[in-house]
Image: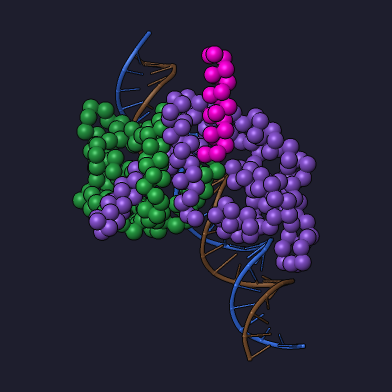
Chain colours: A purple, B green, C brown, D blue
Amino acid sequence: MVATRTTDDLDDALALAEALRPVLHRLIRQLRRESGDFGVSPLQGQLLIAIIKHPGIGTAELARQERVRGPTISGHINALEAAGLVARTAPATGDRRRIGLLATDKGRTVIKTLKRRRTDWLARQLGGLSRDARRAIRDAIAPLSEIGL
Amino acid sequence: MVATRTTDDLDDALALAEALRPVLHRLIRQLRRESGDFGVSPLQGQLLIAIIKHPGIGTAELARQERVRGPTISGHINALEAAGLVARTAPATGDRRRIGLLATDKGRTVIKTLKRRRTDWLARQLGGLSRDARRAIRDAIAPLSEIGL
DNA sequence: CTTGATGGGTAGCCTACCTATCTATCTAGC
DNA sequence: GCTAGATAGATAGGTAGGCTACCCATCAAG
């Protein structure tokens, strides 16, 4: 029955949401508290990685990727620029509203050392789990990424 | 080989952490932004539920459960008390440092209507996924809960 | 009866978002 | 060619939700 199926799906999703939400919040709280200071915040790290991967990317595109508003990007780019990790460059394309973001050598170094030396809290915790547990988490990443388009 | 196994596990955990972290952050950002105002914050909801489940519970116990510092609990209990959802009562046990937290009728009502609410953003998103995707997420909840003791 | 641990609280700070608003530029329709 | 609306980016100001530092009262143990 289609009607029943839909109802079941709704109930299923609702129950799942109730179970998932507190877990997510607890995890994030610990992640924020426990993960030490690497000079750049998690979002800034992501932005830096995105800029390295797509040189000349603009702030609007970054905002869409990270599902964040424009001013949030603006602020973080300001911080990254002040730290000498990225540079705002003149519009490369014909569109003179756009700016092109580039990572500096220092920025690339920061990401490289970050990725190499980040045996952080989260990784340690995950390492303490069984392989099955890690696989279950890994399998959930793709579905979780789909949420929110 | 035990040595190899350990190394693999470390690499595995590290890679998983790198993949999981941005997904978690993105999800939480959207959760915060998109989920409307239900009168109580997610953490306050959890606290209220815990108080209903364990009447007379104290703030220290709540802090441990939600993996949060004492003052954080203090603040939220203040808010919940000001909203008339919980009450601080005299120490029930022999320990006169402790207080006993109780949910008011209003508090119980709030939780009941909260749980029945079907218009939740997260629930809608989860409902839009395939059943397989939801199962993958459900299977990851237990492992994720284990993180951080 | 001091010493240290624990339950609970206040004050003040900080991070990381948000909305509202502004300027400059691009694009479409008249 | 010129205005109307959309888009890129920035700034100002606000808020939520944690945290640390510090305080007091009480308990438990030497």
Which residue shows up at 57% across the image and 52% down it? Answer: A66
Is residue B38 toward the left or the right of residue D1 in the image? Answer: left
Residue A138: % across, % down: 48, 36
Q: Determine if the magenta segment contains residue B16.
A: yes
Which residue shows up at 43% across the image and 30% down it? Answer: A133
Residue B60: % across, % down: 35, 33
Residue A98 vertical position relative to residue C21 in the rendered view, above or below: above
Which residue shows up at 46% across the image and 32% down it? Answer: A135
Residue A21: % across, % down: 39, 45
Q: Is residue A149 visible?
A: yes
Is residue C1 toward the left or the right of residue D9 in the image? Answer: left
Residue B138: % across, % down: 37, 40
Magenta: main secondary structure: helix
Which residue shows up at 55% across the image and 28% down it? Answer: B12
Residue A108 vertical position relative to residue C26 in the rendered view, above or below: above
Residue B26 vertical position relative to residue C6 in the rendered view, above or below: below
Q: Quadrant of the N terminus of chain A?
A: bottom left
Picture quadrant where residue B8 is located: top right
Q: Nearer the viewer, residue D21 or B69?
A: B69
Picture quadrant where residue B117 is located: bottom left
Is residue B68 toward the left or the right of residue B95 in the image? Answer: right
Picture quadrant where residue A115 is located: top right
Q: Nearer the viewer, residue A54 or B106?
A: A54
Q: Determine if the magenta segment contains residue B58.
A: no
Is residue B138 toward the left or the right of residue B11 in the image? Answer: left
Q: Residues in magenta? A: B1-20
Q: Nearer the viewer, residue B6 or B46?
A: B6
Q: Is residue B141 visible?
A: no
